[in-house]
Amino acid sequence: MAQDFSSNTFIPPPMLLLHTLFSCFQLISRGLSTSYVNNKQLNNCQQNDTTTIGFVCNGATSCRSYLTFRSTPTYNNPITIAYLLAADASEIARANNISDVSVLPVDTLVVVPVDCSCSGADSRYQHNASYTIKVQGETYFSVANDTYQALTTCQAMEANNPYDFRNLVVNLRLNVPLWCACPTLNQTAAGFKYLLTYLIRLGDSYSYIADAFSGAGADIQGILNANKLSANDIVFYFTPILVPLTKEPTKENINTVSPPPPPPPPTLPSTPSDQSGGSSSKWVFVGVGIGAAKLNNESVEEQPWSVSSEGLRDAIETLTVYKFEDLQKATGSFAEANRINGSVYQGSFKGDVAAVKVMKGDVSREIDVLRQINHSHIIRLSGFCLHQGITYLVYEYAEKGSLSDWLHNNKMQNQDSYNSLSTGILDWKQRVQIAYDIVDALNYLHNFTNPPYIHKNLKSSNILLDGNIRAKVANFGLARSSDSDNSVPVMTRHVVGTYGYMAPEYIDNGLITPKLDVFAFGVVLLELMSGREAIAAKGSNEEGELLSACINEVLEGENVREKLQRFMDPRLRKEYPMELAYSMAQLAKNCVAHDLNSRPTVADGFMVLSKLLSSSLDWDPSEDFQHSRSFGDGR
Ligand SMILES: *[C@@H]1O[C@H](CO)[C@@H](O)[C@H](O)[C@H]1NC(C)=O
Ligand SMILES: *[C@@H]1O[C@H](CO)[C@@H](O)[C@H](O)[C@H]1NC(C)=O
Ligand SMILES: *[C@@H]1O[C@H](CO)[C@@H](O)[C@H](O)[C@H]1NC(C)=O
Ligand SMILES: *[C@@H]1O[C@H](CO)[C@@H](O)[C@H](O)[C@H]1NC(C)=O
Ligand SMILES: *[C@@H]1O[C@H](CO)[C@@H](O)[C@H](O)[C@H]1NC(C)=O
Ligand SMILES: *[C@@H]1O[C@H](CO)[C@@H](O)[C@H](O)[C@H]1NC(C)=O
Ligand SMILES: *[C@@H]1O[C@H](CO)[C@@H](O)[C@H](O)[C@H]1NC(C)=O
Ligand SMILES: *[C@@H]1O[C@H](CO)[C@@H](O)[C@H](O)[C@H]1NC(C)=O
Ligand SMILES: *[C@@H]1O[C@H](CO)[C@@H](O)[C@H](O)[C@H]1NC(C)=O
């Protein structure tokens, strides 16, 4: 089994020095002649040592694999752990037999299923996560050792990020290559299907690890082979070790509940060469390493100690973790008077108004997307709270409610639907501005985020208006990252969305491309122009007709202007520039084209709307009103 620990037959000089200086740490010197090379991660973040950047690819190029993580006060439920490790919260929940939002006691061992693949010039197995530097003073070392619990190394992080360690600043986004591996042919032949990355701790022994995962097929020899270790080798804790498994690790077949047996008392043998293992030879893991990096000049420059791990763990990335009591206080204990709509409440946090959405189930998608996004026309998630299995998301507040409420007047008569909502009518300039804001947000999602996102559920009820009637795109629960390689379309069998806004190729074939959002945007444009709903309401003469299906009829054949005027929202009272309305209608028609290849990209739409907006803002309603009047009169 050839995971690469190729130089594990000698002790590198720095480690010798370390052993000498730090002999006061618990140290069992049995097997000192062989050392676990992975300990180098503690040694020197700048050293160019190929063994510290990951497991060499010597099996399948990609596979399912498993990481382990011990819950911390901040990362203590499947959602937060999933987004730290770029995993899937519901898969974590399933593997550990807990609900998505269960809060785990600190230090619970959590099994995290992830995809592992071979990448980089050096061909290492890794699972990419990403981390945004939160506090000045965080280093590759502190992120690897403290935040990621040594699931990666500072060397692997340096190899995967273009930034010099001296140039790490707050808000910088780092690639975090987590160590994983795929089975070799030999392991496959021996019946192993998965490799689990286990984080050793003081007191662990091979037999403890083998026992813990024996239900999933682990055995001592398999572990030793996978890590090129012999039974007497010393390894240091907080280093990853691979555990080959024949089955998926689940709560039923793993036993991590009982704490590891206590380590034997540290007995320092008289000579390091004393190899007479006896029964204590099964306790092979020892705890040194704390302060090891201090021995090294460059690491001292990096100062991993300047950040308290407390500070790091107080907050997750850029999100605030709210206390439930604070949410109760802000919303008057979720008082009916503060209910905005459905499960969304208005809350006041020290004078700042926010919207609090109460959610059950897996909300990791929404959190994960929104925490990475910073755009003035995308609703901002400021934080969240987990309490008794329920997630509370705290958003920026959009005081004027949803676009659909403004456009589809019938709802406006229901005064309960939105408190303090003025029942105004949007004029032409406001509507073009809103369209521009939406396409601006989509353009950002499609072209300027990494990875790009597809919203997948754009509709007028997901577009909120702030106090200045500027749009904010909301509800990212269905959003997904699109493949950066656009030539590979993604298919799904699980078609979800809102009828009336869903593109035909998605309904028919589950095809997911950015053109889904273009189609939905076209429908929203048509709503803005006509004031009609995406699907004609029941009781109208053309029951159930799709708005997207109307526009061709309007723009084709004779009397286009007349038909367009009839299509336009009567509440605009013809106060719009006809030429611009026509251009917008053309854009909308192209956006809702049946064939996705005929639809413009969002970037194209953005350019058209930029022009429409600047022309609309220049337009003087009083003049044009006369003009369109005379046009109408003289037909
Ligand atoms: C694979 O297994 C065979 C037989 O068990 C052994 O001889 C060989 O050295 C192994 N190869 C590796 C790369 O571990
Ligand atoms: C590490 O060593 C390899 C060759 O051994 C060299 O190509 C690479 O540039 C080195 N990287 C750094 C950061 O020194
Ligand atoms: C690495 O992390 C472990 C566990 O949190 C901690 O005990 C140790 O002090 C850290 N090492 C350094 C050098 O900060
Ligand atoms: C992981 O990140 C590295 C860049 O550091 C990249 O080369 C590699 O393709 C990524 N792997 C996957 C599976 O995205
Ligand atoms: C999984 O969780 C359910 C409900 O909490 C419990 O009844 C069941 O015993 C658990 N299974 C295992 C293997 O822990
Ligand atoms: C640390 O670096 C400084 C200069 O950068 C050098 O003078 C000193 O000898 C180094 N110390 C060790 C222990 O290498
Ligand atoms: C968002 O971006 C703006 C500049 O575009 C910046 O001023 C602001 O600090 C950013 N906010 C966050 C939370 O990153
Ligand atoms: C209120 O909730 C209903 C159903 O949950 C939804 O259809 C409607 O669009 C929502 N209105 C607003 C303003 O969010
Ligand atoms: C935006 O993304 C589309 C694909 O969705 C691409 O065709 C276009 O070139 C991109 N434009 C920019 C400015 O990045």
Image: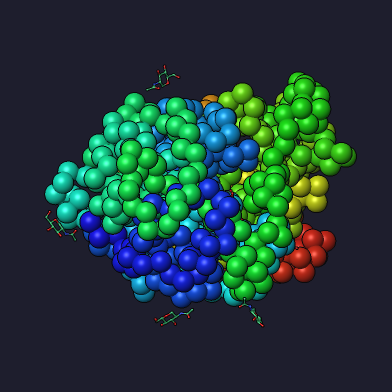
224 to 359, vertically: above or below: below
Residue 271 image point, x, y percent: 43, 57
Determine whether, in the image, residue 527 is placed left or right of residue 178. Answer: right
Quadrant location, the C terminus: bottom right
Q: Which image quarter has ligand 7?
A: bottom right
Determine whether, in the image, residue 302 is placed left or right of residue 12. Answer: right
Residue 15 image point, x, y percent: 48, 65
Tell me which corner region of the image, top left, top right, bottom left or bottom right, holds residue 434.
Answer: bottom right
318 to 11, vertically: above or below: above
Q: Is residue 434 visible?
A: no
Q: For the point 58% across and 44% down, which residue is it?
A: 367
Q: For the point 87% across and 39% down, which residue is it?
A: 350
Q: For the point 58% across and 73% down, which residue is it?
A: 163
Determine whether, in the image, residue 489 is placed left or right of residue 379. Answer: left
Closer to us: 500 or 291: 291
Closer to us: 333 or 566: 333
Residue 86 image point, x, y percent: 48, 50
Determine whether, in the image, residue 463 is placed left or right of residue 26. Answer: right
Q: How is the image coloured?
A: rainbow
Residue 211 image point, x, y percent: 32, 33
Quadrant location, the N terminus: bottom left
Q: Is residue 224 visible?
A: yes
225 to 156, vertically: above or below: above
Q: Residue furthest right?
A: 351
Closer to us: 471 or 78: 78
Q: For the point 46% across and 71% down, which residue is it?
A: 13
